[in-house]
Image (cartoon, rainbow, N blue to C red):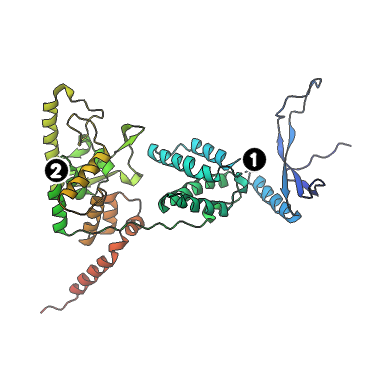
Amino acid sequence: MTKARRGVGEGAIYRRKADGRWACSVTTGYGPRKRAPRPGVESAPANVRLRTVIYGDTRKEVERKLQALRNNLDKGLGHPDGRTTVAAFLDGWLERKHDLKPATRLRYSGLIQHQLIPHLGHIRLAKLTPEDVDTMLAAVQREGRSPRTAYHCRAVLRTALYAALKRGQVGRNVAALAEPVKVTKPSHTLLTVEEIHRVLDAVAGTDIANMVALSLNSGMRMGEVLGLRWADVSLDTDQLTVSHALQRLNRQNRLVEPKSATSKRTLTLPGAAIEALRAERQSQVEHQLAAGPRWQPTIEGLVFTDPLGAPLEGTTVLFRFQRALRAAGIPRLRFHHLRHLHAMLLLRNGVDIAVVRDVLGHSSISLTADTYAGIMPALKRDAAERFGKLLQRPG
């Protein structure tokens, strides 16, 4: 009588004599033989039984793991490879993740190679626990890294483990179960009109004056300003389209897609921004005439370039901005603060938050509200005062 094949997911639990641990050899399917048949054997079965062994310190632990394996097999997810380390998994995950932008991939790679793998890489993926992640996050900060770096470490690991969870490589996302890292949000100070004029006066006459005026009057990010092309500008209709950003990757400047899908947007510009663009076009024409054959742009059609047509470096622009502020005795501001000033002035003057979201290219209203939560109390007071005036009796 032919012996019946063991069904997929079936296995017998037994106790090992060698060490007293409990185990279960489970059939996970049938497939082709991986190794060549022994010499002298004319043929081998087309398919052989594929098995995996589950171990545990108690019978109940093995029963629990066996049930989890059966659930995975029912879903077609297979069984986690208990030998895969976190390092091998993260390297493979990043290599397979093709939807990352170049700068994001570079950032992920740095966090994986310099933070995650040194602290977690030796641990087997199936054995990784929330406590391991907590220990890693604490160690990253003890080594002098900022809470924001630790925050991003957890975020990258959580994203990677979510992919592993969908593939059945792990039973839970331990990074999501780890304690979140508290990150202090930067405060955005709303300057007075007089203070803003002081900033504009400080950069007046410098080669970044038009850049500062455009960012302040449009809310564009520095990379979007640096990557702006004349083909995206219509001075006749007072509009421009944000379609690219300039990034420096591997010591090379290149135009990339904006930060998100909603970052691609068309802006209607106020007069000050249009004046800045007209002044920059005139300045660029003068530089091109003075440079003659030395005018050799590496990216054609950029609005903001150096005197020979090359793209401007973000670090250089920031250095010149800070130098101009110091010379005028103005407290330090990030160039990115110009974008925040634009948004805060719009909100303070009653512009609907949905419009501000579209101007900034945010993905959601909640992101805009969260970013500028610090000025919301003042906006609520303004709204209350305006509403009160609406119901005032005449006389």
Q: Secondary structure at mark 2?
A: helix
The reply to whether discs 2 and 1 touch (Cβ–Cβ < 8 Å) is no
Check the picture and name the quadrant holding the N terminus.
Answer: top right
**Is residue 50 shown to the viewer in this render?**
yes
Amino acid at circle 2: Ala
Percent across and percent down for residue 243 are 28, 39
Q: Which residue is mark 1?
A: 83
Front disc: 2 or 1: 1
Percent across and percent down for residue 392 are 17, 77
**Is residue 168 shown to the viewer in this render?**
no
Check the picture and name the quadrant holding the C terminus.
Answer: bottom left
Give the residue displayed 14% in from the left and 23% down from the top.
292
Instruction: Give left or right: position of 56 versus 84.
Output: right
Instruction: Give left or right: position of 138 versus 81.
Output: left
Q: Which residue is mark 2?
A: 276
Give the residue displayed 16% in from the left and 21% down from the top.
293
Amino acid at circle 1: Arg
